[in-house]
Image: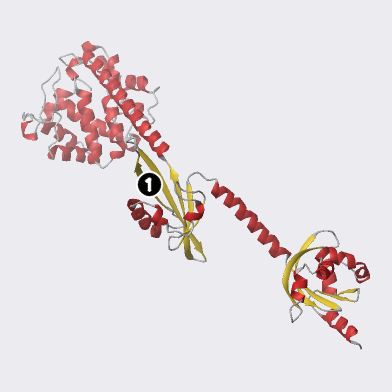
Amino acid sequence: MNSQDCLETIVNGLSTPAILQHQGRLLLNPPARALLGYTEDEVGTLVGTLEEWFGILQRERAGDDRFAQEARRESDEVDPLIIPVRHSSGRELWVEVSGYVGESEDVFLLRNVTDQMQTLEALRQSEKRWRALAENLPGSVMELGIDGTVRWTNRPQEDRSREEIVGTSALTLLDEKRQEWLLAALPESSSEQPATFETEEPLPNGRSMWLEHRIVPLVDYGTRTGYVVHTLDVTEQHERERELREAIARLDKTLNGAVLAVSAALEKHDPYTAGHEIRVAKLASAIAEEMSRQDIADQVHLAASLHDIGKIGVPSEILCKPSRLSEVESLMVRTHSQIGYEILESIDFGWPLADVVHQHHERLDGSGYPQGLSGPEIPLEARIIAVADVVEAMSSHRPYRSALAIDVALREITTNKGTLYDEAVVDACVSLFAEGFSFSGRPRSEEPDVSFRRNDAVKAVAPHPS
């Protein structure tokens, strides 16, 4: 067996795809034929095709190919090179080519790297898309190393180009205050919970520019390798929030003015209860805060300020009657809860204020009116107003009796705690007065102390359902 036959035998026996070219003849071993999609009979037609695939023969002869350059090295070995080739079906493959370029024969080993190249190309395209996205994001985006060095930024600063920023410490781009915030925020950030902080920059016109800084760590196999810092101008958002707060404040002022106007109109209709709703609102909101329910204190105050609005539909001669009411008159007074509900139900307060006004005379045991609700069926706001209403009514002057002492009113709600009135609400109310709460703002010691038996107080209050 001569050397040529020996070489062909070796190439054919390789498990790796290999191509042997010798004196114009091509030999593709079985793995190479399987890779490129050609039969043994078709191999003889591939000389020109190989030149098209690899450009090896022509460029090697012309001396302008890497194969030729490598071939001139002393060992005549060719370092691996990844190039595209055509399968017999016409589809493109990527192969890693390495081997030997000799004077009379060339041996090339092939490795199919199409999957890897497609993955690499997908990664390149993905990076290209995300880079384009980052470069066009509003605000400033910087990629920092773990030591705070800027690796990349999407835009220049006023006095520095992007090239000048990259490689410098991010701290040199910030004032002292923002340096402190950044140094504090970096270790606190996590992939699940990016760190965010805002800074206020004074402007020459006396206003401020607000910047929001969002820091997301870069993690590689569980190790933090850097950070992405996104800085966004949120001044307009702050301006909108300020304008919204001012608008809400104006609306609150308007609403409060409307409530006061309604209360004033009701006082004209029922002068003996002048200021009653205002005082009930003061006590009711204080009870809510004493119960640590600041979340409903404002709602309770508003509902209490309007809880008797329905009395506008009750004849004033009944409301001001200085003696016991008849059964029919009592029933007419009791309609004020329903009338108040009907007045308010069409107004959207964002929460069921009309229901609270409707239910402020309900009692825990179901003995109240107008619906006979009991227990948890009565919302907390209505239970609070019920207690405040009773305490204020008993301690204020009425056409059919003089004002009673606060102690009498507190004894009334304490005795019926858990039966008529909510226990937690009663406890909060009693605590308030023990701490010095006063409707008039006077010290507790100056409140009138009129001795009055509870039974007498109940009798005095009973003729007029309030």
Q: Where residue 50 sits in the image (x, y, percent)?
A: 85, 67
Residue 365 visible? The answer is no
Residue 119 visible? The answer is yes
Q: What residue is disc 1 on? A: 198
Q: Residue at x 70, y 60 (%)?
A: 118
Query: Quick check: 252 above or below 289?
Result: above
Q: Mark 1: which secondary structure?
A: strand
Query: Quick check: 285 above or below 181?
Result: above
**Total numbered labels:** 1
Q: Where residue 99 sits in the image (x, y, percent)?
A: 77, 76
**Way the structure is coloured:** secondary structure
Q: Where residue 179 sits in the image (x, y, percent)?
A: 36, 54
Under mark 1, the amino acid is Glu
Query: Quick check: 451 above or below 125?
Result: above
Horizontally, residue 202 falls left or right of residue 138, namely left
Q: Residue at x 10, y 21 (%)?
A: 402
In depth, the one of 369 and 3 nearer the eye is 3
Q: Where residue 76 sits in the image (x, y, percent)?
A: 76, 79
Q: Residue at x 25, y 37 (%)?
A: 288
Q: Residue furthest bottom?
A: 1
Where residue 5 sits, quadrant-wise, is bottom right
Query: Quick check: 77 above or below 330?
Result: below
Horizontally, residue 159 falls left or right of residue 108, namely left
Where residue 41 sits, quadrant-wise, is bottom right
Quadrant of image for the N terminus: bottom right
The crowding category of the residue bearing disc 1, from other C-alpha atoms within 10 Å (few below 14, some 14 to 19, many at least 20), is: some
Horizontally, residue 234 falls left or right of residue 267, namely right
Quadrant of image for the C terminus: top left
In depth, the one of 34 and 334 nearer the eye is 34
Horizontally, residue 312 falls left or right of residue 75, namely left
In depth, the one of 460 and 231 nearer the eye is 231
